Image: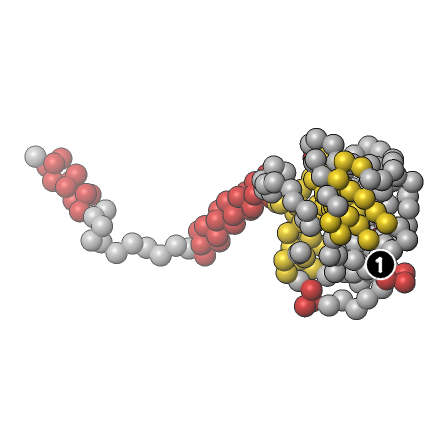
């Protein structure tokens, strides 16, 4: 009987109606650290499988992008179908020093690409492209043969700085297999300052979506 009375007393002492002692500072810090670890783990998973941050090197995409720009990249295949006008990052062994390059999709599989290097006009499926994003007309011939049809599973890439870009016009690159596309650049998250003749002021108004 007495034992029953003692157990009942203990149960009452732990009743939710009884005020609980506040956490000590150490317990509060440990709680925050616990939350931070979970947040960092989730962020790591997201940026491992969905996004990554890449840095632009060089001026081949000037003036859309400048040397030192930080871009948010949606990884393949989460970026969906690649379309004309998309800015992508590609990597393959035949690139100089094996480095990744950032370029714009000019045409996709099955489309025909032709370039009039005298006028600097690019034609896709016989229609001239309205390329207000280019820094210079496409006057530089890198040795490719035109017109050409983009092979199945590939894209034709060019930089916006047409006379200062090494891209699909060169037979060493040619059409790029979609499996060699790391992802699509969707936003500029920190502006760079360019390089050499393409040095610019760090302009934070450039931060935002890319097109």
Q: Residue at x 74, y 53 (%)?
A: 129
Tell how many labels: 1
| Residue 115: x %, y % from top left | 83, 47
Q: Residue furthest front?
A: 126
Q: Position of residue 94 (x, y in %)?
A: 84, 33
Q: Quadrant of the C terminus?
A: bottom right
Label 1 sits on residue: 136
> Which of the pair 95/175 is nearer the observer?
175
Quarter of the image with the N terminus in it: top left
Q: Residue at x 45, y 50 (%)?
A: 31
Q: In which image quadrant can residue 119 be found?
A: bottom right
Task: Indicate whether 125 appears above or below 135.
Answer: above
Q: Is residue 55 visible?
A: no
Q: Residue at x 53, y 43 (%)?
A: 42
Q: Residues within 10 Å of mark 1 (few under 14, many from 20)?
A: some
Please say which color scheme the image uses. Answer: secondary structure
Residue that lies at the very extreme toward the top in this rendered image: 152
Q: Position of residue 52 (x, y in %)?
A: 65, 45
Rendered view: 25 above or below 114: below
**Rendered image quadrant of residue 187:** bottom right
Left of 48 or right of it: where is 140? right
Of helix, strand and loop, which one carries label 1? loop
- Left or right: 123 as drawn, with respect to 184: right
- Residue 105, image x, y percentages: 72, 45
Residue at 39 percent of width and 54 percent of height: 23
Q: Is residue 196 visible?
A: yes
Location of residue 142 by image quarter: top right
């Amino acid at each position: 009987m007495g034992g029953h009375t003692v157990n009942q007393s203990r149960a009452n002492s732990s009743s939710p109606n009884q005020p609980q002692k506040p956490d000590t500072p150490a317990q509060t810090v440990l709680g925050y650290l616990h939350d931070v670890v979970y947040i960092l783990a989730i962020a790591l998973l997201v940026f491992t499988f969905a996004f990554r941050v890449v840095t632009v090197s060089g001026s081949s995409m000037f003036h859309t992008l400048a040397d030192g720009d930080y871009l948010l990249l949606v990884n393949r295949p989460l970026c969906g179908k690649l379309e004309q006008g998309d800015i992508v990052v590609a990597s393959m062994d035949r690139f100089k020093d094996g480095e990744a390059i950032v370029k714009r999709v000019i045409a996709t599989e099955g489309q025909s690409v032709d370039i009039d290097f005298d006028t600097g006009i690019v034609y896709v499926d016989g229609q001239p492209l309205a390329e207000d994003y280019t820094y210079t007309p496409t006057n530089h011939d890198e040795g490719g043969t035109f017109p050409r049809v983009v092979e199945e599973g590939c894209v034709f890439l060019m930089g916006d700085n047409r006379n200062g870009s090494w891209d699909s016009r060169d037979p060493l690159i040619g059409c790029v297999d979609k499996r060699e596309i790391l992802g699509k650049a969707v936003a500029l998250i920190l502006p760079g300052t360019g390089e050499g003749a393409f040095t610019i002021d760090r302009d934070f108004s450039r931060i935002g979506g890319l097109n």
